[in-house]
Image (tube, helix red, strand yellow):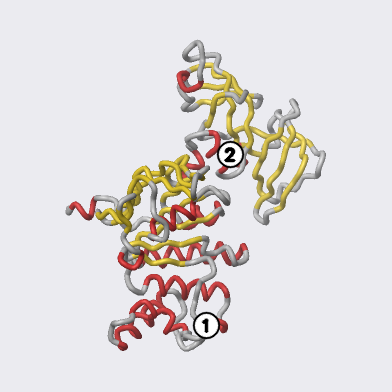
Amino acid sequence: MSASATRPLLELRDVRQAYGDTPVVRGLSLALPRGAIGCLLGASGCGKTTVLRCIAGFEPVSAGEIVLNGRVVSAPDRTVPPEKRRIGMVFQDYALFPHLSVRENIGFGLQGRPRGERTRRADELLDAVGLAGEGNKFPHELSGGQQQRVALARALAPQPELLLLDEPFSNLDVELRERLGQEVRDIIKRSHTTAVLVTHDQQEAFAIADEIGIMRDGAIQQWDSPYNLYHRPANRFVADFVGQGVFLPGSVTGAHEVDIELGSLRGEIPPACELGCDVCGKGCRVDVLLRPDDIVHDDASALRAEVLHKAFRGADILYTLRLASGRKVLALVPSHHNHALGEHIGIRLDVDHVVAFQAAA
């Protein structure tokens, strides 16, 4: 296997960026394999769009380097212009040319190639994004979802080494975002393109990306698969940020056991040295993360909890439950179990992954 096939297509090595004296990106590193879809996920102001602009070449870096296909494209002493990076970009507002047809928009980045080749490539991509037969229309004649697919086709037309997507679905309604997200993933995968998505929407990130970096204050807290981010968060911030859940106080009673109000859990408990315990192995006070799918509704259980709130979601209901201690937990329950507020229902634990952190002060 060649070196180019095994090395990451994109690498960021200790990248830093600042606006004046205000740091925006703080020592950020990541590596994305060829053909993978990565995502920078975080709240507004965390620096994710600045990182994307640095990758594209729109912003210089003040330290570190960005490597694309083995070539340094950004460093403090050099910046390869955006047009020479072989990068495609899909913007938040689509940025389609209103006076050009859909076919002409898609072929815009192929200027200099024979007209017949441009038309063939545009029609090929129209078919790939599910818009065959729409090439003669103008952008205003299409829906928002169709315009987004045209913008994606235009970015893919020159066969870029890397595709960047900046909050591409933020102008669409929730239902369309979910459906289009899966379609976009399929299109990118079929084209064998490497891509980086920036978003604040967890469901969007989970639907599209192979690897996700949770960002906070210009740094990546954890770069991992969606599964590991949810079930094996690296720190308390990631645990809080990803998905829904609550923390219950617990006490470590053995190397692989922790007791909480709802019972005893067995699993990989963080080592004592990480928890700051005086005695290794036992007595550590921890906070245990419980997800809604960790609490199972069970009429036969002697353990009861009061229904405080319910959110109907169609196939299931998200219940907020009050335990005997007054603490609250969440439970995801099939919607045919429709309980009234104030009702006490039976619950039990079904925890596959024990997630525990040093008890908060």
At a point 19% along the width and 52% down the height, the residue shown is 3
- Answer with the quarter of the image where residue 309 lies: top right
In the rendered view, does 209 fall on the left or right side of 261? left
Q: Closer to the camera, 295 or 268? A: 268
Looking at numbered disc 1 in the image, what kind of residue is underneath it?
Pro
What x and y, as percent, mark residue 18?
46, 48
List x then y, in percent, for residue 105.
Answer: 44, 80
Residue 237 in the image: state x and y as whole percent. Answer: 55, 37
Report the residue that reaches farthest toward the top.
279
Alpha carbon separation for disc pair 2 and 1: 43 Å
Q: Residue furthest right?
A: 342
Q: Residue at x 59, y 27 (%)?
A: 287
Q: What label does residue 240 carry, if any?
A: 2
Count of picture labels: 2
Give the residue pinned by disc 1: 98
Front-lying residue, 39 or 134: 39
